[in-house]
Image (spheres, grey):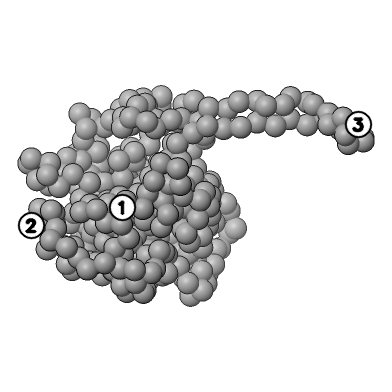
Amino acid sequence: MSAPVPSSTLPAHLEEVRARVTNWGRWGDDDQRGCGNLLDDAAARRGAACVRTGERLSLALDLGPDSPQVGQPPHRLNPELTMEAINERDPLVPGVWASSDDTVRMSTCAATHLDTLAHVSYDGLLWNGFPASSITPDGGARYCGASTLTPIVTRGVVIDIARLRGAEALDEVEPGYAITGDDLAEAYDAAGLAPEPGDALLVRTGDVRHLHAGRRERYAKGDEFRFPGPSLHSVEWVRQHDIAVMVTDTYAFEAFPPPAPDWSDTLCVHMLQIRDMGLLQGQNWDMEALAARCADAGRWDVLLLAAPEPIVGATSAPVAPVAVL
């Protein structure tokens, strides 16, 4: 049900990029998976071929009161755990057992997560032309919600630009370091790898070290709202190489400030990658241990496993990703 592309409110420099990177209609007018279609059997086999030692590393942050949310933007909640039953017995069931049950109230993007293709819109449209008005208070996202996300089984490539620049973290080089397509190509070359359709880019900036050190405000709000991350100048490279997934160890995902001095292109990477390309994006992934292991081993490719929670109607999905070396 793809709609014709109307006159856009995008700034002209973004419209030029949009026209070159759009994937609308590529997998059919009713497609809700976007670049998840690139996560095919061949991508899974390439990922499996990366397994050498079998070591498994979690890339997920803990879900708890010290998760990244600090109220910017509003409405986002860290997980709140409520114990509903503690060592209770069911009087209708025989035996000597006891059990405990609990509930969690949280934002779906509270910590490590994937954004759905319903997460970002502009000009009243979501990915592939679905109407943004299809997201409602009672049902959430009618199209492109979390239950449509593709489970990730593919080759993950650790993109550690900080290490390539001889720094512990990119904000030591520049608080708003804007990762370009040339940076991504350099990381592949340094790893001795070539991009393959369906790859997942695990972009390490080192920014998550602020969260680990208890500097939650710094992690969530940046250095005066300056963040390192992928920039507008990385978008076309990602599209040209049919990357399926791109995740970062940052709160904002993309570089801030945006390119335009008046910030009229704020969240340009989100808009172009999610709404126009159908790319699977993720934030708050913890690549610290993985990057250290990869540096020790002299290799930067892993099997990436990540199954997002299929919450019907959700616009983001919690995920507990695992890298297998």
- At x 24% / y 57%, what residue is drawn? 272
Q: Earlier in the sequence, mark 1 or mark 3?
A: 3
Q: CA distance from mark 2 to mark 3?
A: 69 Å
Q: CA distance from mark 1 to mark 2?
A: 22 Å
| Relative vertical location of residue 48 with respect to residue 75 in this rendering, above or below | below
Q: Residue 30 at x, y = what percent?
A: 38, 69
Circle 2 Cα neighbour tier, 10 Å, few/some/many (<14 / 14–19 / ≥20): few
Q: Earlier in the sequence, mark 1 or mark 2?
A: 2
Q: Label 1, secondary structure: give it.
A: helix
Q: Residue 258 at x, y = what percent?
A: 16, 44
Quadrant in which residue 225 is drawn:
top left
Question: Which of the labelled discs sits on residue 12, or is there none?
Answer: 2
Please name the residue that numbered disc 3 is placed on.
96
Circle 1 Cα neighbour tier, 10 Å, few/some/many (<14 / 14–19 / ≥20): many
Q: Residue 160 at x, y = what percent?
A: 33, 50
Question: Which of the labelled discs sits on residue 132, or is there none?
Answer: 1
| Relative vertical location of residue 142 with respect to residue 61 in this rendering, above or below | below
Q: Label 1 is placed on what type of residue?
A: Ala
Q: Label 3, secondary structure: give it.
A: loop
- At x 41% / y 51%, what residue is drawn? 141
Q: Label 3 is placed on what type of residue?
A: Val
Q: Label 2, secondary structure: give it.
A: helix
Q: Earlier in the sequence, mark 2 or mark 3?
A: 2
Of residues 277 and 51, the one drawn nearer to the viewer in this rendering: 277
